Image (cartoon, rainbow, N blue to C red):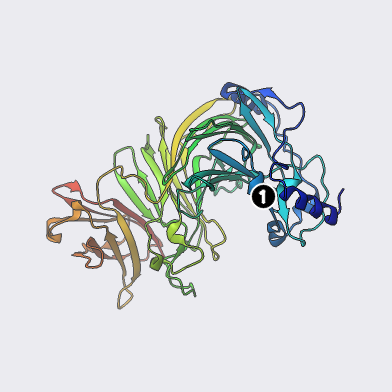
Amino acid sequence: MMNRRDTLALLAALAASPAVGLPMFRDGTAHPFDRAWLEAEARRLSQQPYQPLPEVPQGWQDLTYDEYRWMWFNPQRGLWMDEDRPFKVDFFHPGLYFPRPVEVNVVQGGEAQTLAFDLSLFDRTDQFPDLPITETMGYSGLRLRAALERPDIFTEFAVFQGASYFRAIGTGMNYGLSARGLAIGTATDAGEEFPEFTRFWLESPMPGDTTQVLHALLDGDSCTGAYTFRITPGPVTHMEVEATLYPRVDLPDVGLAPLTSMFLYDQTNRAGHDDFRPAVHDNDGLMIHNGNGELLLRPLKNPDMLQVSSFVDTDPLGFGLVQRARDIADFEDFEAHYERRPALWITPGEGWGSGSVQLVEIPSELEIYDNIVAYWRPRGGLTAGTEYRFTYGMDWCAEPERPRDVARVMNTAIGGNWNRTQTLIAIDFADHETVAGDPADFTRVVQSSRGTTTEGVLERNPGTGGLRLTFAVDPQDHPSMELRAQLLKDGEPATEVWLYRWSA
């Protein structure tokens, strides 16, 4: 093993010669590859007991958060940097939260070759510790880049790293929420399982291509899967996902197209957060376009206890986590820039049948923890030994394309009234042609599963131009109540349906 002095000397020599140190293939790894081969491999593995990949040496796993950041990939040595291709790829080193490396393959002409782990592709500070390099070493994930704003600068737009997690952004956005290949046992007494993308295949793009194709093999205790991602970056980064799953065991609690985000507080739960910022969250609402054509918006919350909500449906038209707060004044955070975090919208590619959109909200005291999970839970789950195929689109964007032309829910504020016998709720609907005119022309629909609600007051918001609906709720000693509100005009929806679970 080289000592640190020799390694730094080698890195300096490599930096002086950009053509040296580009990713290399492992000898003897070429193999035919296509989608059918990937599905056959996932099916084969599902018929065997799960065998996790080897872990890297303990020293890499024991890295602190700061030490892990003292080494980083040199983007000048990325995949295809010396070729005329529209996409470039960087890699992440293992260690810390990523003890098991993944295998990365490059596909061209129907043949795949495996990339070798190469320490010389990374730069580091003098403080990075000397660590052993063994045959278990590999990359922990990958980052995709493209010339999105300038032809001479390749900026990142997607990252795949850790279990089956991945995330993406539209042009000019900051990373926020993540997605996963599959959720198993989320918020169950048995505990959650995190299957992993263990192998990736990058299809070599040709000049002029606008879509990068990435394949992944999912493997875990309970399930294997073959995934194909067709990723087109831009102001809206769009992914077309094809997933074929092979459960090893029955999976009664499984989630398709799972999303993971962070919500700490906003105007609905500002009390108890001693912070100068008015809000802290990656996303502030779950939006659903259900099979009946209704457009629902459920503001997120940071509950005192674990909270699971089910929105039962058949053949949903779409769902996702959105970020309606888009002004820097909404957060006053000049470093995190939560106003630039993406929304993510899921569009099923075919009928998904009966099931429910699940929303899991986990109590959290710090913004570093993801505490929001949303996914589609098929009714009856998945059965062992059966093949399941699902397709769906993913749009990482500022706001999903409007599936219905109605006014959006822009903001929700909640607080007690003057004598604390009731709770006041104010809902702001955006300025839109469907809410133009005299507020008296609209029908106010306010409903509760228990307790009582007032009819509410509807008035024009002079700050936004939209309408504000304010009403009071009285739980009458009930610990929680499901609330629903909407504005109608001439019997037709003028706004999204606002949903909320109030709890004591």
Give the quadrant of residue 29.
top right
Mark 1 lies on residue: 74
What percent of the width, then of the height, locates residue 402?
31, 45
- Extreme-front residue of the structure: 16
- From the viewer's perspective, tell me whether residue 67 is left or right of residue 180: right
Could you say which is closer to the camera, residue 395 or residue 203?
203
Residue 94 shows in this picture: no
Nearer to us in this view, 208 or 331: 208
- Name the residue rendered at 26%, 62% in the picture: 453
Left or right: where does residue 244 sit relative to residue 124? left
Q: Nearer the viewer, residue 332 or 16?
A: 16
- The reply, left or right, for residue 28 in relation to residue 331 is right
Q: Residue 166: x percent and y percent? A: 56, 45
Please state the total of marks drawn on the protein image.
1
Looking at the rendering, which quadrant does residue 498 occupy?
Answer: bottom left
Residue 154 point in image, percent of width and height: 54, 46
Residue 487's place in the image compared with 40, above or below, is below
Q: Position of residue 384 (x, y in %)?
A: 59, 28
Left of 123 or right of it: where is 396? left
Q: Secondary structure at mark 1?
A: loop
The C terminus: image quadrant: bottom left
Rendered image quadrant of residue 83: top right
Residue type pointed to by label 1: Asn
Residue 56 visible in the displayed image? yes
Furthest residue toward bottom: 419
Q: Residues within 10 Å of mark 1 (few under 14, many from 20)?
A: some
Question: Residue visible at 55% across and 65% down?
Answer: 366
